[in-house]
Image (spheres, rainbow, N blue to C red):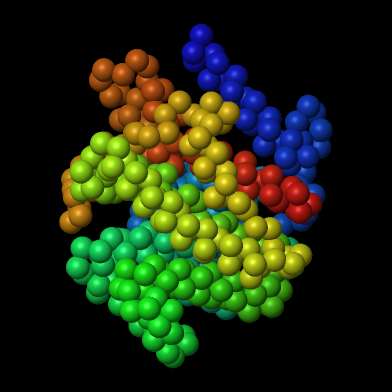
Amino acid sequence: MANKLKLLAASLATAGLLAACGGGGGADTTPKAKVTSVKVMGDSLADSGTFGFKFTVQGSVLTGTGSTLIWPERIADQFSKSLCAYYRAGDENLTTYQEVSNCTNYAVGGGRVNPLDAPTSPKSVLVQIQTAAKAGFSAEDLVIIDGGANDAADVIGALIAAARGNSQPLNAMVAWLDSKAPGTSTALMTQAGGDASKFSGLAAGAYLQTLAKTLAGSIAQNVIAKGATRVAVLNVPAITKTPRFQMVLASIAQAAGGGEAGAAAATKQEAAFDGLVQVFNNQLAASLGGQSQVALVDFYTEFKSQISNPAQYDFDNVKDPVCPVTGVDGSGLPTYTFPTCTAVALSATPGKPSPDWWQHHVFADSFHPTPYGHQQLSQLVARSLSQKGWL
């Protein structure tokens, strides 16, 4: 019975996607807008295989036909288009990439609006946008952009490091702010009244706000001004709800003594971290607002809803990653190996109630969605495109 209900839910989800596209019930499923090319810029959430795999549970092959469809590929499929990775590298630590000119997914795993360690590399979403702009945009392109989640995670990590006595990551962000507007750090310190902790919070917010303005400015200058008329931009999801940050918050609670006091400390910290994500999202919305060429996709609100109301989305687990832990990083958090986290391997996991035990979890690892999570995200994007009359 459980499997039948899953199949029914999946059918209803597919029907919902068709309805968002003007189809279902025998209706015409032809997209409302002609799209000759789908062009993607972003991070691991949208990466079609820069490093030879996708950042989710793998299909029968790692990339290409037979691989897991991630959300931008599902959207492209609605227009009878396929995507492949423009940048190729054999290792996530490489700084050099091959470029495949006939591919139009420029997204790179680990992408940031501002990768402080490699600002001119393809891990910069801004560089991806500029590279795509050189190839040109047309009024019949659909451009999809996501970015900012890794930047927000970096900021949170920098604040935690600063609280523990290591101000180097935060200092790098402040230096970047000063490069954009000299004297920013002095002004923020004055505003903080010399309080180092308050200064850190102000600097973090200013950094993310400036990043959002910078991303929006690049979209205006290098995408819209270059001829694109249909641009879907995702905001940053509520990353504090991911297993990665729930583990960080648990450690904060423990450091605060556990119990009610620890829980209160973690709750307060989560609200502060989440507030920083909202700073980025609010500025992005303000900077992109009023532009008819832009569909702003509210991933933040949708993701929070998925975690709070999992049954509404047919999720049965919103906490536990399905991929096995394969190591531990320098901060003590678990690491995962995506190329070996396959659908076949997960379905063969001993001791599980059924082979499909993992299929309706939210998380593949501690930060990325499962294939079903990608399906849900594609449906959100499809609804946003439909509201603009593009799908």
- From this viewpoint, which residue is outermost toward the front? 193
Q: Quadrant of residue 135?
A: bottom right
In the image, is 215 to the left or to the right of 20? left
- Residue 224 or 328: which is nearer the viewer? 328
Please indicate, yes or no, whether residue 211 appears anywhere in the rendered image. no
Image side of residue 309 versus residue 95, left or right = right
Residue 319 visible in rendering:
yes
- Answer left or right for 123 relative to 328: right
Residue found at x 62% / y 25%: 11
Question: Which is nearer the eye, 374 or 290?
Answer: 290
| Residue at left offset 39%, top offset 67% | 201
Quadrant location of residue 337? Answer: top left
Which of the 4 image quadrants contains residue 145?
Answer: bottom right
Residue at 45% x, 54% y is: 274
Q: In this picture, is 275 found above or below 360?
A: below
> Can you give x and y, in whole percent of width and height, for residue 107 in the image?
47, 61
Q: Residue at x 51, y 9 (%)?
A: 1
| Residue 361: image location, x then y, percent | 42, 31
* Residue 34, above or below 365: below
Note whether 40 is above or below 372 in the view shown: below
Q: Furthest residue to the bottom?
A: 182
Q: Position of residue 294 (x, y in %)?
A: 69, 63
Residue 41 position, x and y percent, is 52, 63
**How many labels, in total?**
0
Q: Is residue 162 left or right of residue 132?
A: left
